[in-house]
């Protein structure tokens, strides 16, 4: 089985004060028996948000300790185009281009579950581990 890893999951993993921290830690522990994947745009978003919210040391810690546990998929031209089209078609919604890329990636790879706190994953038809927060986002 495969779990997709979203920015919100990584941020809750490194933030011990996040209410979802314990659940996310348990979900990451599943990585011992399940494949954990993400894509390059999630890495970019995660590092930018982590450095801004928590500082450079946390961003470096994600690079050193979290990313090695993940299979980071590249965002090729086809995936980017699909995500950009989906984003343009729903540009009035609050769903980000990174999330649209995640949804397109998950569909392409046949992944139906994500370590994500963003309720948009559930709205898009994916299961979230732990359960998404209503209105939650990165």
Image (tube, rainbow, N blue to C red):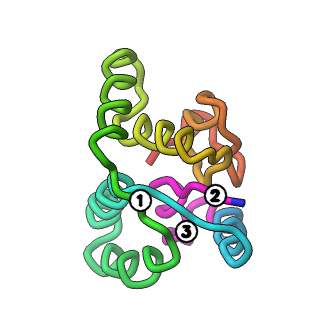
The mark that comes first in sequence, 3 or 2, is 2
Residue 136 position within the rendered picture, expressed as x and y whole percent measured from the top left: 54, 41
- What span is in magenta? 2-22
Distance, label 2 to label 1, CA atoms, is 13 Å
Reading the image, the residue beneath label 1 is 73
* Above/below status of 13 relative to 119: below
* Above/below status of 60 relative to 90: below
Asked if the residue under mark 1 is in contact with the one under mark 2, i.e. CB atoms within 8 Å, the reply is: no
Q: Is residue 4 magenta?
A: yes
Residue 78 position within the rendered picture, expressed as x and y whole percent measured from the top left: 33, 38
What secondary structure is marked by label 1? strand
Reading the image, the residue beneath label 3 is 13
Distance, label 3 to label 2, CA atoms, is 15 Å
The residue lying at 31 percent from left, 80 percent from top is 60
Residue 59 position within the rendered picture, expressed as x and y whole percent measured from the top left: 32, 73
The residue lying at 37 percent from left, 32 percent from top is 83
Reading the image, the residue beneath label 2 is 3
What secondary structure is marked by label 2? strand
Which quadrant is home to the N terminus?
bottom right
What secondary structure is marked by label 3? helix
């Amino acid at each position: 089985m495969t779990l997709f890893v979203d920015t919100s999951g990584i941020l809750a993993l490194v933030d011990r004060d996040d209410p979802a921290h314990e659940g996310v830690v348990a979900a990451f522990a599943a990585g011992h028996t399940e494949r954990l994947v993400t894509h390059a745009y999630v890495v970019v978003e995660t590092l930018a948000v982590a450095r801004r919210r928590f500082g450079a040391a946390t961003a470096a810690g994600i690079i050193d300790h979290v990313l090695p546990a993940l299979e980071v998929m590249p965002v090729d031209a086809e995936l980017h185009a699909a995500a950009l089209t989906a984003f343009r078609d729903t540009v009035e919604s609050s769903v980000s281009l990174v999330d649209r890329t995640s949804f397109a990636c998950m569909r392409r790879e046949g992944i139906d579950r994500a370590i994500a706190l963003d309720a948009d994953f559930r709205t898009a038809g994916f299961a979230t581990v732990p359960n998404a927060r209503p209105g939650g986002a990165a």
